[in-house]
Image (cartoon, rainbow, N blue to C red):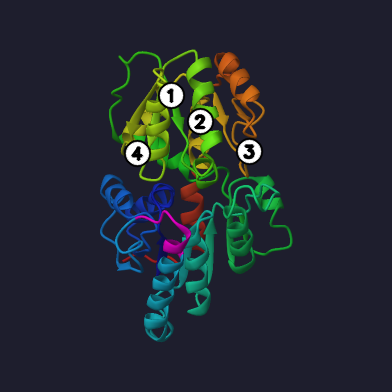
């Protein structure tokens, strides 16, 4: 039996293509959820066509998304309590042959630990990414290093990420991230509703290391407002909404329009039609690279290589780089990536080969 353990919307989006391919082949699996994201993840589960979780390990912080460090501590305590309560049954029943985790969140680490203490091998999807700076991104870089040491199977998106796992056994190159399948699946499943829209750019800035710096937020949004060649839709979520909307209103940034998060299928079409993207999201960096959309990665460091040197540039929070990107974005546009290989198929085939997946 395969058990997926995840807790954020991004993890659900990137694991869903693997689950869909298992469904297509009639291979059973379970998914256990920590609800590190609460309401947003519940909505995403429905939108992605995923069934209700087989187990709820934790329900965020008292049913709400985690926003403060103290809430994270309480949530981790809840995960630990669930694990201790079910550990004996997990060991006796051997309900999982393999635990599959994704990415670089605290859920990734905790899911790996649950697998290890239950005596179950752990497979890490999106393995081997490294920025080389433990502080950027924080704590994601540390999360990846921890899971890289504890997981037994490593699904690395590229040869470069596989090289970061040199010396470890069971490293499988998937020739891309599963987000490529998520994007292509969404395009195939839903119509395009953006064809008649006016030109626009997308802004998605939500990471704690950015939002927690009011001066940086204000400088960035002011630069975007003053230098963008097109109006900008600024996507906000429960973590970024207050800071971004207040800054836009207080500074009267009339070329920036706050926009709510969309379900993934609609967002993929919105992203594809955008003239440019400004983001601190690694997942959006990968999705934009599929379409060749000019992208500014507004972070100090990124562990991903998608688009860099061609359609994407890293800002290092330097406003002069932001302005330069906005001026030159149209010349950076690339073409759609029509790579035939499906990373999710590679993961599923490997799980089957290892004997972890059997048909009903």
- Image coordinates of residue 310 in percent, x first then y, are 63, 25
CA separation in Å, label 4 and label 1: 31 Å
At mark 4, the secondary structure is helix
| Residue at 60%, 19% in the rendered image | 323
- Image coordinates of residue 139 in percent, x first then y, are 58, 55
Identify residue for label 3: 305
CA separation in Å, label 4 and label 2: 28 Å
Mark found first going from the N terminus, 4 or 1 = 1
Q: Which residues, given as a range, are shown in magenta?
A: 65-72
Local crowd size for mark 2, using a 10 Å CA cut-off: few (<14), some (14–19), many (≥20) = some
Q: Mark number for residue 218?
A: 2
CA separation in Å, label 3 and label 1: 34 Å
| Residue at 62%, 53% in the rendered image | 141
CA separation in Å, label 2 and label 3: 28 Å
| Residue at 40%, 21% in the rendered image | 252
At mark 3, the secondary structure is loop
Camera-nearest residue between 26 and 131: 131
**Residue 244 counted in the magenta span:** no
Local crowd size for mark 1, using a 10 Å CA cut-off: few (<14), some (14–19), many (≥20) = few
Q: Quadrant of the C terminus?
A: bottom left
Q: Mark number for residue 264?
A: 4
Local crowd size for mark 4, using a 10 Å CA cut-off: few (<14), some (14–19), many (≥20) = some
Mark found first going from the N terminus, 3 or 4 = 4
Identify residue for label 1: 251
Camera-nearest residue between 141 and 177: 141
Camera-nearest residue between 251 and 90: 251
**Residue 67 counted in the magenta span:** yes
């Amino acid at each position: 039996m395969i058990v997926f353990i995840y807790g954020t919307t991004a993890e659900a989006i990137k694991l869903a293509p693997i689950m869909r391919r298992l469904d297509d082949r009639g291979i059973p699996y379970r998914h256990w959820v920590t609800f590190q994201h609460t309401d947003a993840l519940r909505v995403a589960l429905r939108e992605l066509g995923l069934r209700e979780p087989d187990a709820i390990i934790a329900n965020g912080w008292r049913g709400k998304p985690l926003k403060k460090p103290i809430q994270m501590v309480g949530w981790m305590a809840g995960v630990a309590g669930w694990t201790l309560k079910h550990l004996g049954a997990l060991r006796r029943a051997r309900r999982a042959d393999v635990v599959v985790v994704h990415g670089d969140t605290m859920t990734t680490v905790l899911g790996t630990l649950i697998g290890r203490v239950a005596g179950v091998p752990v497979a890490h999807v999106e393995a081997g990414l490294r920025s080389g700076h433990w502080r950027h991104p924080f704590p994601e870089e540390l999360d990846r290093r921890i899971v890289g040491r504890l997981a037994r199977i490593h699904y690395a998106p590229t040869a470069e990420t596989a090289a970061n796992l040199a010396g470890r056994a069971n490293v499988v190159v998937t020739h891309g991230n599963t987000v490529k399948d998520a994007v292509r699946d969404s395009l195939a499943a839903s119509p395009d509703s953006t064809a008649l829209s006016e030109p626009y750019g997308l802004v998605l800035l939500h990471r704690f290391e950015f939002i927690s710096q009011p001066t940086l937020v204000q400088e960035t949004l002011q630069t975007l407002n003053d230098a963008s060649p097109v109006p900008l839709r600024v996507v906000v979520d429960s973590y970024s909404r207050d800071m971004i909307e207040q800054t836009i209103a207080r500074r009267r940034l009339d070329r920036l329009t706050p926009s709510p998060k969309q379900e993934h299928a609609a967002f993929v079409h919105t992203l594809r039609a955008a003239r440019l993207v400004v983001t601190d999201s690694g997942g959006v960096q990968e999705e934009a690279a599929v379409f060749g959309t000019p992208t500014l990665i507004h972070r100090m460091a990124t562990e991903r290589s998608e688009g860099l040197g061609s359609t994407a540039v890293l800002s290092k929070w330097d406003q002069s780089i932001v302005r330069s990107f906005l001026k030159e974005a149209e010349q950076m546009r690339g073409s759609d990536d029509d790579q035939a290989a499906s990373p999710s198929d590679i993961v599923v085939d490997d799980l089957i080969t290892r004997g972890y997946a059997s048909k009903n």
